[in-house]
Amino acid sequence: MSSSRRVVNVGLIGCGEVAQTVHIPTLNHFNEYYRITYLCDTSEQALKQCESKVCGSARPKLTKNAVELCSSPDVDVVFVINANEDHMPHTVFALQHDKIAFVEKLMAMNHRDVELILDAERKSKGTVMVGYMRRYATAFIDAVKEIGTFPHRFSDYSHEDARELADSNADWYNQGLKEDLDIPVTEQSKTMWSLLGSLGSHDLSVMREALGMPKSVLGCSIDAETPFWNVLFQYPGFACSYESGINEVPRFDAHLEVYSRTKQITVQYDTPFIKGLPITMTIRENIDGGLQERIVRKTYEDSYTLEYKELYALVTEGTPVKTSVEDAAQDLKIFQMIMIAGQSQM
């Protein structure tokens, strides 16, 4: 390890599946860059489980209090990787203590929370990076240039913690659906809103960077009970078809395809829960009247690893990141377009 390289201290808020299977293993792999110094969760068992996964002789401190972690001088970066409903308050806590906040998507699902985070960021010496890892994949970045532009579960949560989460959950839906869109809060609308904030936040962020913001929704079919959905977006001069859903076939299929008259570009993603699986770009094009097909795989570094390199540059050099608060707020606008277009189906 270079003696001059700064090691960044990380505090993790949230010790669930993603922390156990993705973030802690990747941070362990990056021990020349990062050190996990603090863990926070309302579950004692989850804390102990994640503590056991942290490599190194120095053991992280454990707490159930997010403010304690955010205010600690032993923390440079706060990873906000807990329930979506808690992303806003814990990101704000980090910013109030002048920390860098790395918040997993989905950052926010209503205008109020976006504005609260923006206001806290303006007043802070810290800043926010949103964890859209697919957009840091080398294959995706190359494709944009071509285009032209199973873990442990725990149940030892107190009734008080469960009640607090339920209250936050209700407020989350009420603000996002009723207050922002005047859409009734029903089981179907809540399910669809959650699906857009989970799978949708991955997909639509990639679509935005590759193609830009859509002008409108031409039509959609959404069924929260299936759950599968299709949306047709209008862009200047072309349309984009977006489809997503969940079934019980044990495979992971996520891709972006862009067609022109003489070229087709496909970015194929694999599951992020198995480290090191390749993300590829396939180019099919007309060369002198014939078909030429190329599969490009520049690196076996996964998108989380590449994302962490950008985060390290942000912390140590102040290098701006593309997945900012303002950037993430654009996804909320697309979710709202879909919900308004499909309101009669819920």
Image (cartoon, helix red, strand yellow):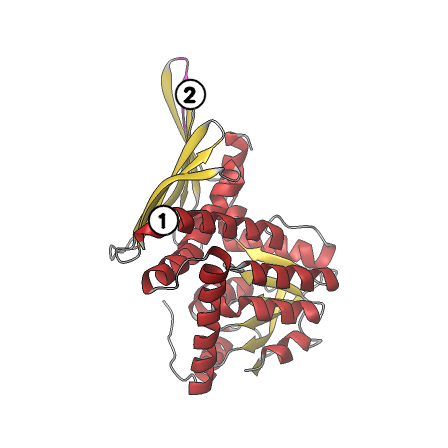
In this figure, which residue is indicated by the disc labeled 1? 342
Q: Is residue 125 visible?
A: no
Describe the element under mark 1 as helix, strand or loop.
Answer: loop
Residue 15 colored magenta?
no
In this figure, which residue is indicated by the disc labeled 2? 262
Q: Is residue 15 above or below residue 121?
A: below
Q: Is residue 179 above or below residue 62?
A: above
Residue type for callout 2: Thr
Count of labels shown?
Answer: 2
Which segment did they paint magenta?
A: 284-288
| x and y, in percent, of residue 210 in the image | 51, 38
Describe the element under mark 2 as helix, strand or loop.
Answer: loop
Q: Is residue 295 above or below residue 96?
A: above
* Quadrant (top left/top right/bottom left/bottom right) for the C terminus: bottom left
The residue shown at (54%, 30%) is 148
Residue 238: quadrant of the picture:
top left
* Quadrant (top left/top right/bottom left/bottom right) for the N terminus: bottom right
The residue shown at (53%, 41%) is 209
Q: Is residue 23 visible?
A: yes
| x and y, in percent, of residue 239 in the image | 41, 32
Q: Is residue 319 above or below residue 1?
A: above
